Structure formats: structure tokens, C-alpha cells
Amino acid sequence: MNNKCIAIDGPAGSGKSTIAREIATLLGWTYIDTGAMYRAITLKILSSNISLEDISGIQLLLNNTQIEFNKSKIFLDGKDVTSQIRSEKIDKNVSAVSAISEIRSKLVELQREYAAAHPVVMDGRDIGTIVFPNAKYKFFLTASPEERARRRYNQLRGKGISIPIEQIFNDIERRDHMDSSREISPLKRAEDAHLIDTDKLGIGEVVEEIMSRIK
Ligand code: CDP
């Protein structure tokens, strides 16, 4: 049983990253946003013009890729890509990229390396099922698609980006569908993960619930 890893999974917009970051701060642990890693690889593939069918090209690209976290920033081959990986273009392509098994193997290996070096709070889609099936603390966050779209809409507005809420809703539904129906490591609640429906809960309430379970 690994009690130095807290696994937080759930669909897009369920509040995972805000909550995971807060729990990590409270515990003084390292926060690892695995979605940001899939986004960073997507950025690299799109800028290298490699086709998703070109598995040997992807393998070569993976062997020459470095992903690092420093404070709340993510670095791809030494360059800060924290804002760049949140674009609409990445949103549109990341689910297809993250369905490729070679990419998943490489990123899962990196995720396990991070956790071997530090106690971590890690969020994603497959942390409790595949990356750390033996994690002592596992949580699965959900919320209705409408609420998740509303949250994403407000988050983007806060950054001065205005996208119609219907478009955000459709993107979330499409990504949920692709992430849940893919063959390898689909988005799924681990049987031993504690389910939290965050529809009517504020961030503080979810954080409190998680903290009370891990104390
Ligand atoms: O923040 P948001 O909920 O929009 O998504 P994210 O956590 O940044 O993840 C982006 C995408 O990466 C997801 O839609 C999945 O396709 C993929 N992903 C994955 O396959 N496995 C993970 N552990 C994390 C993300």
C-alpha cells in the first residue's frame, strides 16, 4: 500500500486540479497535474507535424522529450508552456493523443518516477486505476456536465477569454466520451476510490472532505 500518493481522478471540469493543488499545499506535498503532461505532448506533436498514425515518429519524439514541473509551471524541453497548453487547439486534440498507448506508457513511467522521489498529490483520469492502483487514498470527483461547463466558462472568462458556453459544453461532452470509451486506461472510477459529487459543493468543502479522510 502506497500512503505517499493521493490519487484524484475525474472528468473535465470536475475541479480536480484546483482541489489537488490545494491538498498538496496543505500537506506540503508535490502536486502533479498529469493532464498538463498529456497537453504538453499534444503541443509538441502538433508543432512537429507528426501524424498520430506515425508510431515510430512518435516513439522517437518521446525519446527526445523532457517534461518537468517547477512550482506551478510545466516545462517542455526546458521551455515554460504553462499557458500555451490551455489553448482551444490543444483541448480539441489532447484526447486523441492520449489514447495512444506508447504515449501513455512513457507518461505513466514519468509519473511513477516523480512519485518515487516525493510524496505526491496527482490528478488525472487513470491515477487510481493504472498509475497507482495501490495508492492508499483515492478520490473520484464528478459533477454534472452543465455544472462543469459553467465552471470552465467562468475560469476562461477570468482569464479574459470568451467562448460560448454551448461550445464549452460540447467540448467537455466530446472529451468525456473519448476519454471514457478508449481502450487503454479509460476514465473510470477505481472500485476503492471515494466518490465525491461536487455539483453543490464549494472548493473548500471538497478539500475538507478529502482532508478528513486522509487524516
Ligand atoms: O483540465 P481538464 O479537466 O480539461 O483536463 P486535463 O486534466 O488537463 O486533461 C486533458 C486530457 O488529457 C484529458 O481530456 C484526457 O484525454 C487526457 N488525460 C489522460 O488521458 N490521462 C490522464 N491521467 C490525464 C489526462
Image (tube, rainbow, N blue to C red):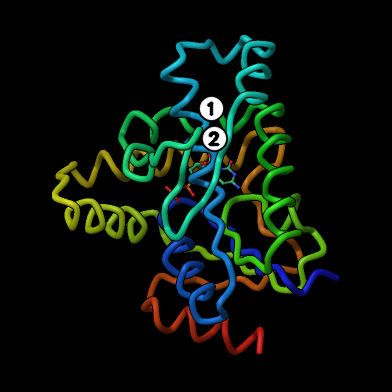
Q: Does the residue labelled 1 lie within 8 Å of ligand 1?
A: no
For the residues labelled 2 and 1, say whether their Cβ atoms are less than 8 Å apart.
yes
Residue 7 location, quadrant: bottom right
| Mark 2, secondary structure of its residue | helix
Q: Residue at x 18, y 42 (%)?
A: 164
Q: Residue at x 48, y 32 (%)?
A: 94
Q: Is label 2 or label 1 in front? A: 1
The quarter holding residue 195 reads bottom right
Q: Is mark 2 within 8 Å of ligand 1?
A: yes
Residue type, label 2: Met
Residue 86, percent from left and from top? 34, 41
> Regarding mark 1 in the picture, which secondary structure is present there?
helix
Residue 96: numbered disc: 1
Instruction: Report whether 62 appears left or right of 46.
Output: right
Residues under labels 2 and 1: Cα distance?
8 Å
Q: In this view, does 206 lie above or below 87?
A: below
Please name the amino acid that badge 1 sits on.
Answer: Ala
| Number of marks drawn | 2
Residue 166 at x, y percent in the picture: 24, 43
Write down the residue under mark 2: 178
In the image, is 179 to the left or to the right of 154? right
Q: Which one is in front, 182 or 99?
A: 99
Q: In the image, is residue 73 above or below residue 186?
A: below
